[in-house]
Amino acid sequence: MKLIYTDSLIIGAGLAGLRVAIATKERGLDTLVLSLIPAKRSHSAAAQGGMQASLGNTVKGMGDNEDIHFQDTVKGSDWGCDQDVARMFAHCAPKAIRELTNWGVPWSRISAGPRDVIMNAKKVTLHEAEEAHGLINARDFGGTKKWRTCYTADGTGHSLLYAVDNQAISMGIPVHERIEALSLIHDGKRCHGVIARCLVTGELRAYVAKSTTIATGGYGKIYEISTNATICEGIGQALALETGVATLGNMEAVQFHPTAIVPAGILTTEGCRGDGGILRDKDGHRFMPDYEPEKKELASRDVVSRRMTEHIRKGKGDDSPYGPHLWLDITILGREHIETNLREVKEICEYFLGIDPCKEWIPVRPTQHYSMGGVRTNATGESPQLKGLFSVGEAACWDMHGFNRLGGNSVAETVVGGMIIGKYVADFCEQNALEIDTALTQKFLDKLQNEIDNLVDGKGTENPFEIKKEMQRIMMNYVGIFRNGPELDKAIAELKALLLRAKNLGLKCKKRHSNPELVEALRVTRMLKVALTVACGAAARTESRGAHSREDYPQRNDKDWLNRTLATWPNDESLEPVLHYEKLDVMKMELPPGYRGYGNDNNIAHPDTEKRTQEINKITAELGDAPDRHTLQQALMPYTLPSHLQPANERLSDTLAVIPSQPVGNKSL
Ligand SMILES: Cc1cc2nc3c(=O)[nH]c(=O)nc-3n(C[C@H](O)[C@H](O)[C@H](O)COP(=O)(O)OP(=O)(O)OC[C@H]3O[C@@H](n4cnc5c(N)ncnc54)[C@H](O)[C@@H]3O)c2cc1C
């Protein structure tokens, strides 16, 4: 058995994994990262639009602060998030931006004076303050009150990942590439590392560690059409699920992005709409204001995706050989803007559609995009069930996103989560010894070896590629944007049948090294289990919340469903997960459940909502006329952060004599 030891083991070399690696390495801990692919090709590189942080530099962001970012995040989550975590996040996002700047991220900057932008399909001139000249710019994104999405044109993820990976390289953090973690070594209480397989040689290795962090990204590829990279197959979630002990949180919370191109499913960033692009139907009509008069194209993603689907169902989609779609019109932004701020979008349109988006509309439709669900952790990023197991980034359910994550909050979560959770991982490594149980490790290695032997030498007849395709079709058809009981039951029955069939997988290619068919066979069973947690969670949740929309239960039901779904898979032989629920306590919420400000307003109230609202009013009144916002926040919902991250964030508005919240000369042309 090949054994490799380290203090801090991280599975995944995307933004989240690398940021945790930096945090543990800078504490002097031996740190090792595993990745399917070279770090710089991780899916984080695909993020186009930007990263949310309440810097408040630009005139449309003036007056922004952690409170407003927190409120946008909670409303966006449809009250499904953990508000403590949303607070930790909102407070640290500006710090993460500044740290990334130090590491060389070339953020787009503000030029003082007038600038023309498109708002509500009209050209508007904004006037940026002299004092803001050269500071980090922000765009309208994610349905937020203030413009706070910082960006580097439309290549934000790319520049972030390069900067963070270069930082990791300069610190000497090793990344073992083309290595796939396939099971966790654990004794039911403590995690001791992973069994991983080299995708090139086929060798199995045991990586034994004090702490193990799952940072493997989302599970989008359980769906047929997704904006996700092909490696986003949910194996990280399966690692936790297959322990039978660790839980997955809110797996049914899957986000569909409104504007992926048809048919490839490649994303055109929300920055297109943030910068002023609009959606049109087959008649060229701008339909979003009919449904969402206030936020229009910039309502939250779950809402825009649903409105688009509703409009297509009314026969207003344009037909194509790939089904009906709508149009994204960015021609109104002008060539100069597109070639400066949306150049990746332009290239995607040219290469994959053969069109020039400066002149032609882009065919788009809602497509699977983001996994709000993942490995359930507490606020320190640790699994409540398995000591020493941490998770971060899209792989995790740290839970600042609830049932809908805001555009720009995800790359922010990777680096902020990495920064905060990395500190707790380092603490864990310092406080716990490396425990090497060779018998336990051998047991997990033998189990995986046995699985591989059966696939290569067995007489199975089922084709892993076909089973995967079937699963993706089922998820797309029955567990998509609009869901209902009968279709979800059908999905579960069909997925279970596939899982049974997957017990009889057979390979045509018998190689044990460099064998994509073997890789597929090892993954498909795990993906099916992940898909079943999504479908079963969706079937059980008889309400509509955020991206989980039940046609047969259209109301958000705070009375019965203000909780988080937890899924485990305790019995290896079983064909479905066991679901448990974790209640959200309204009496501890800083922002009790209410209307989001967009979408439908037809909620069933929680009995504590009124009580908590009165309590909040009382606490606020006791603090006097105009309480300092930090004092008020602490009185309402105290939360914990590592001490070095606690200091207040400085903003331009702290030093400006007059805050230009209503920019002088801001007029429609
Ligand atoms: C097209 C697109 C555009 C986006 N744009 C934005 C945006 O503008 N703003 C925003 O906030 N968010 C955006 N997002 C979301 C955001 O990019 C992701 O949520 C985030 O980058 C995920 O980072 P991560 O570090 O968690 O995972 P990833 O970057 O996906 O990294 C996962 C890592 O895990 C490794 N891995 C996976 N499984 C295994 C295994 N079994 N063994 C070993 N290694 C493994 C992979 O090799 C990879 O290194 C976008 C998403 C998409 C799809």
Image (cartoon, grey):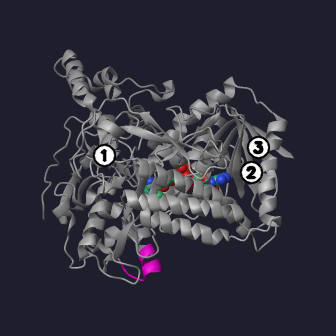
Q: x%, y% of residue 309?
A: 30, 66
- In depth, the one of 657 and 62 nearer the eye is 62
Q: Which residue is mark 3?
A: 207
**Label located before the other in sequence (3 or 2):** 2
Indicate the quadrant containing the C terminus: top left, top right, bottom left or bottom right: bottom left
Instruction: Report the predominant secondary structure element of the magenta stretch.
Output: helix
At horizontal 24% and vertical 43% (from top left) the residue drawn is 603
Q: Answer yes or no: do the residues labelled 3 and 2 have beta carbons within 8 Å?
A: yes
Instruction: Assign a secondary structure to mark 1.
Output: helix
**Label located before the other in sequence (1 or 2):** 1
Instruction: Assign a secondary structure to mark 3.
Output: strand
Q: Given the image, on which type of amino acid does mark 2 rest?
A: Ala
As measured in the structure, the alpha-carbon distance from the residue carrying label 1 to the one carrying label 2 is 49 Å
For residue 508, side relative to residue 341 (left or right): right
At horizontal 54% and vertical 35% (from top left) the residue drawn is 381
At horizontal 36% and vertical 70% (from top left) the residue drawn is 365
Q: Is label 2 within 8 A of ligand 1 (CB to nearest ligand atom)?
A: yes
- In depth, the one of 419 and 527 nearer the eye is 527
Q: Which residues are magenta?
A: 348-356
For residue 620, side relative to residue 38 (left or right): left
Res. 132 mark: 1
Q: x%, y% of residue 227?
A: 47, 64
Dot 2, how many residues are within 10 Å of its Cα: few (below 14), some (14-19), or many (20+)?
A: many
